[in-house]
Image: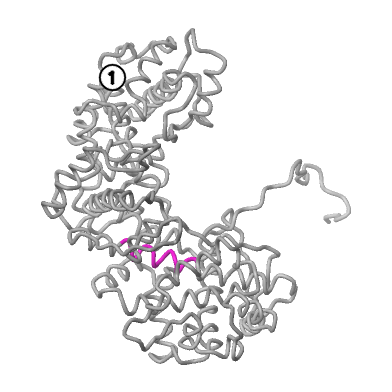
Amino acid sequence: MLNLNRLPDGIALLNWNSELPSSGTGDPLGMTLRVGARLGAELLHCITSITPRARYYSFFPWAFQRAQERIGTSDNLDLTMRLVLVDERAMTLGAVLHHEGRPCDGGSLQGSNRAVDFVAQRTKGTIDLTKWNHLRDNTSGFDAYKGSLINLGMFEESTDPGEAAVKDEAEGSTSLQSGRLSPRGQKIAESFGRAVAKTEFNNIHTKISSVDLDVLAEFGAASGLCELRYADKFDLLPLRDLFFAAQSDDQHNSHFRRRMSLLLLLWAVDVTNEAGVTLDAQSFDDLTYYRIISDELGEVTSVKTPPVLEDISERWRIFHFHNYLTTALESLLAGLVRAIRHHPAGRTVGEVLEAFNSAEARSALGEYLAIELPIPFMDLTPTESLALLEIDCAAAKVFEANPLVERLLRSSLVEEDLVSGLAGPAVATLLLFALLLRYKTSVKEAHKGWNTKKVIHPFADVAIPTVEMALTTDLGNDWWNLPNREVMSRLLNRFVVRQHETMSYEKGFGGSPPLFRVDGTMIVGMDLIRDDVDPGNPRFPSAMQVLRDLRLIVNDPEEGQSLTPDGRTMLESFLESGGS
């Protein structure tokens, strides 16, 4: 019989020698990595948050072609990848050597930190690139760019460009069987090959592993990320053609969307520069969501979008609608988590709503709005709630008195940290109502339909169309005139509580920990909080960096961010030709 007071021979308990780090709570409602990712993947197809440098898009095809030529076959992917890794290390270390210990301007040279550390110790002698690791665990930066290169048609097994009309980037092909380049990939590889053809490194024999550091510096001077900005046209133009999908005028695939997004960014750089404003994620949001430019003093100027860019601008507007919705719902989640935190037995949704409706919360909201609420917030209707913001749902120009209401509310939640305060849930609710009203009154049916198509799994994907449908189906078309308590009960149950449960289940063991668990009608907290509710625009910085690398925009210390002569010529040419 087993003696529970004495462990049998051969059994030992785990003895932890350090505390395990807690998992993060990123994307707790699945808003960013589901519908948000699908919108971004179509708008900037193959330009992701981790693929910001244009040079890598030609370097890797060249490295694959060079490796296969050196080993005499394209049937040995494992050996090909090892040789690609060596060339990647050569480019990384060579660029830092060329820049006298600094990484390339603009950053994102993968492994540059280790290269900088190396160059701080040595600038002369040789190095065995098969033994020096620029990244952890002997990995390659190719993993970050692989999906984009495959979906751009660089390899024989790549997704056909025509298929991009029905596949978003996350669902496209990301597997590599042989690494054989397609004709398009060969053309891109040859352009990079011409750039480094005269370097001594280019002619090094396969079996030679030790390389002189001076040879690497010469290679880095020709192959570095920022060197592309000063490259000859034979090196630069094929990459411009690639990113702007110059070989295709099919207006129904994601490559066309990327072209139009990049053109929209070029136009946005130009129009904001004329207004004395530097284009960043916020000003791009303002330009596409509100059609305005706001300067440092808060002065607002209306802007008319060129006709050829109206469609892509409206699609970016849908993206920003989704971002605002993410902030609103995640702020409600943050308020719920705080409301249940010190209640070990948990609370019901009704009890959470009463916590949102407390006298202290009512006072905090009144102070924020600089008014005295006539009745408790949960007893108001959505229509009456928006009236607190001078938004008249029955007026011809609904938002005339408060045109930038969503921006102001989000800023209050994120930048002023109201999300962690007593007024946070009510402010998030006002943001949600304002969003739904603007979407209903200002978005064309065609773009509503495009947004709806990004909802693939109705019970797991949250977007404005699913929120609208749930409220209308459950509460009727007149839900705008029901008490907030009734409306918010439905929203919290479906789009906060159940949605977080669904996402926690999908992530499973090893993923982000749930912020609460549900026991019958009780929501039981896990003693966690989450107040980071700004999803941002993760692909925007990468797209801007690509345009800088392609020598289409430039940052000037005196004139700010502006178009280069090539950028202006390209923009004007596309606008005149209707985007073709």
Secondary structure, mark 1, is helix
Which quarter of the picture shows residue 434?
bottom left
Q: Is residue 301 magenta?
A: no
Q: Is residue 172 visible?
A: no
Q: Where in the figure is residue 41, as x and y percent of width and height?
A: 34, 54
Q: Which residues are magenta?
A: 316-327
Q: Is residue 102 visible?
A: yes
Residue type highlighted by circle 1: Val
- Specify the farthest residue to the top: 125
Q: How many dots with numbers?
A: 1
Q: Is residue 70 above or below residue 178?
A: above
Q: Where in the figure is residue 122, as x and y percent of width and height?
A: 53, 13
Which residue is painted at 26% across and 26% down in the image? 231
Q: Is residue 230 above or below residue 443?
A: above
Q: Where in the figure is residue 303, as x and y percent of width and height?
A: 28, 62
Q: Is residue 211 above or below residue 83?
A: above
| Image quadrant occupied by the N terminus | bottom right
What is the basis of the colouring in this image? one colour
- Specify the farthest residue to the left: 577
For the residue pair 416 and 237, the one nearer the viewer reads as 416
The residue identified by callout 1 is: 196
